[in-house]
Image (spheres, coloured by chain):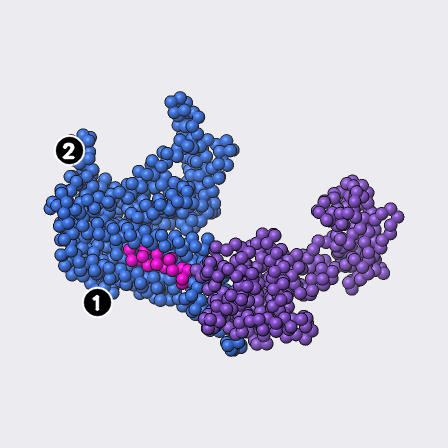
Amino acid sequence: MAPLSGAALIENRSANSEGVGTGTKIKLSIRSVGKSYGAVTALADASLELAEGELLTLLGPSGSGKTTLLMMVAGLVPPTSGEVWIDGKLATYTPPDKRDIGIVFQNYALFPHLTVFENIAFPLRMRRMRTADIASAVARALDIVQLPRVAERVPRELSGGQQQRIALARCMVYSPSIILMDEPLGALDRQLRDQMQLEIKSLHRRLGITVLYVTHDQEEAMAMSDRICLLNHGRIEQIGTPEDLYFSPRSLFAAEFLGESNTLDARVGDGGRLVGPGGLVMRVKDDGGTKPGERVKLLVRPERLHVLADGERADNVAEGELVETVFAGGLTRYFVRLADGVMLSGKELTDQTGDRLRQGMPVRIGWRAEHALVLRPE
Amino acid sequence: MTVAVQPALRPPRGQSAWVQAWPVYPLVVLLLAIFVFPVGQILALSLFDPAGQPTAANYVRVVTTPVYLQTLAITFEIAGWTTALALLGGYPVAYLLAHASARARDTLTLLVLMPFWTSFLVRTFAWMILLGRNGAVNRLLISLGITDAPVSLIFNFTGVMIGMVHAMMPLGILAMLSVMQRIDITLVSAARTLGARGGQAFWRIYFPLSLPGVAAGGLLVFITALGFFITPALLGGRREIMISQVIISVVQELMNWRFAGALSVVLLVAAGMVFYLYDRLLGISTLSGGAAAETASQRRPGLMGRAGAFIGRRLIAALGALADRVAELREAMPALGPARSNRRASRPLLWAISGAVIAFLCLPALFVIPVSFTAGTFIEFPPQGFSLRWYATYWNSPGWIDATIRSLIVAVCTAFLATVLGTAAAFALVRKKIAGRGAILALALAPLVLPRIIIAVALFYLYARLGLLGTNSGLVLGHTVLAVPYVLITVMAVLRTYDERLDQAARTLGASACRTLYYITLPQIRPGIIAAFLFAFITSFDDLTIALFVSGGKTSTLPRQMWNDLLLQVNPTLAAVSTVILVFVTVFIVLAETLRRRATSRAG
């Protein structure tokens, strides 16, 4: 077991600089893994690969199976079916202590009866490393998380953010193949969360570690991930980069779980046209392989809507009444009620809206054909 | 990587639920052998005659002999009055404990727990000192001029009541406390803002919510009281003979196992009937502190349930109204001042009543201390002069010292065995999905509710044939059955608050299951395990019932030795021994309780 040495760091960094998905080593491979408790299926037939140096997020609402999947990768829960491969070795039923993985738990799981030093030294002692090497490895790990002076304290004397960093240090000190993070920022307040997101991201880049990250917070997932694996009801909905998931969601669930969206009921007409609420005819660039007559959902992100000036044209235009504007700093949100009562919400930069938007005024809303997405209802 | 990862192609052994449950097996085997089998045997014995033919003769004899029916009636009478008085006196104390500040609660709980754990014989002996013809109470009454001649406080119903209520009240308080602690006190404030006076708010809102606790406490006290024999034997008169005493004499004097078995069945059926009635009226789930809303009377409103609920509601409304009339009267009297709020006026009253009750629980045992230093040859209060002669008598008596040493050895072995078996079982019961988990738990906790006298008689019968009578190992096995429930309850509570993710973290950090247990789990739950050990120690050290049958003569334990002296020749040596036990046990309990608290609060 290589301790976290300078040479290892540089080596890792160069490995990472090759980038993700360009023939780099596969660190984790999950093949058709399923878990059921009696008649209840917690996870069905999940397959997933994680490349070296990648940060992949398991995202989904609670009960979607993301923690179950993480626990099976860790070896803390045995899968009902399928295989887990870690570092090219079959590890489906390997006990957790023989898997060479690390976990950062939501509540950090720092051992309350041990000092910070002993917490970080624990994985090294379990690997029977020499005492002198342990001391220097722990010191380096504390340096990396920028807490060099807390070694002799016990966990409960540290703040939440500090405990979080110690948990990270304990996990990185033995350079495991994969680091699993189970909602690691869930217990922190908003401001500390944003800061720790940046720190974890930068540690990930600097050290080239491979991370499987679990969260239910879509903003966090988009901010941190190389790729996101979206789960719902024990199934993988979609795997892709944050951009993929945001701009090309493959299901209504994916579209609505990531970011905000307006969804309109529509029926497919001829030649890339859809008939929406109140007979509104809408053009789309891609009809998503739907057939004429099919009932579909049309999705448009709020930031894709524009309040049209007099005489301005757009691919799609809807008329309605501006019911509400909400000032949110740099952005202003507005809500438009169309003739038949359907509400659309839009977002514009505040300095662009200026005084244009007044409550109760009639407005025309426009969006481009390629910004509307056709999805089948679930 | 120094650890070669062998690909594991199939689930490792130990995935099977039966294999995973292994830590409970030693305990289950012990309980089946030393508890279920002998008790079942002694009960079955009552149905057969010596020739092995089925017979109802033993039961016919119970039913047709007036003295046994009379004993049964007295047993119920004593248990019933004990229950009523213990609940009445315990309720304000439980209320105070539930809603006092955390610090006050800790201290007060300890004061209530102390008499619960302090040697039963010592406490009964203390009442003998206090209530005797020339006891402290009578001396006080005479010197105050309240009476001219000593009042009969002992060897009658009064004496039994004082002793029994004193012994049972802590149990009732703890049962009520566990429910009251979960009542949201803001509900009472809400009722006040909705226009209820203090009395109405208490009787209509708080009291009904606390009833499951009262019922659970009542059940526990009643069932436990049914099996008593120490208090009626030492404090009662000729009339106050309870069924356990009859069982003892049937076994020890008549050696009639079959009839003793029949009497045990009668005692069990009596206890079972109380359980049944309780379940019909309130639902057994309230025992484990289930929500008040889940009571049986609401789930399946039978005739009895509905009638009970109707009467209950009327009674509560009447009590609320009565409390408010009293409050109005008081407000109407200018001397007391209408400005004072009801709550503030009732607070000192609550403290005064609770204080008196707690003093009743804690103080009597202390009277053995001055008596033990008497220079006279009789037990009297106030003691004559000062000397250590009775301590010397104790120290120089081989009988007493042997008994003390034997009790210590047996208690240490019991505590060790019970802690190991109970802790292992607690781990499996809390952490693994075990088929029949409820049944195993019920089996392991059964020695708490089953009258001890039945276990003792059953063990006597079993040991007589195994040659274990009068042996330390026989005592240890029997005491382990009694002590295991306390270990199980303590360790399971600690494990439930233990964050299992710490173990998961250790596993993923490279520790094997054994090293995780040794380096991570055990160091953190150590206080809980030590507390369990101490409780098990005390259970064994204080037990008279099992020792009464299994030990004797030269193999007496300390309680057995005390019992003999208490029956035959009450002397100041007993006071000296009692003082030693009192100090020893008090230190133990304070230690155990402190450790237990530290263990369960750590995870929070």
Q: Which chain is blue?
A: B
Q: Which chain is purple?
A: A
Residue located at (75% from left, 54% from top): A301
Q: Chain of mark 1?
A: B
Q: In the rendered structure, which segment of residues is drawn in magenta?
A: B522-538
- The crowding category of the residue bearing disc 2, from other C-alpha atoms within 10 Å (few below 14, some 14 to 19, many at least 20), is few
Disc 1 target residue: B467
| Mark sitting on residue B149 | 2
Q: Position of residue B150 (x, y in %)?
A: 16, 35
Q: Chain of mark 2?
A: B
Above or below, B246 relative to A291: above
Magenta part, dominant SS? helix
The answer for how far apart the CA atoms under marks 2 and 1 are is 53 Å
Three-letter code for the amino acid on which mark 1 is drawn:
Gly
Q: Secondary structure at mark 2?
A: loop
Q: Secondary structure at mark 1?
A: loop
Q: Position of residue B321 (x, y in %)?
A: 43, 30
- Which residue occupies the foreground of this view, A44 or A51? A51
Any part of residue B77 in sight = no
Residue located at (64% from left, 73% from top): A15
Count of numbered badges drawn on the protein: 2
Q: Nearer the viewer, mark 2 or mark 1?
A: 2
**Disc 2 + disc 1, Cβ < 8 Å:** no
Q: Residue furthest top?
A: B334
Q: Position of residue A162 (x, y in %)?
A: 53, 57
- Residue A50 magenta-drawn? no
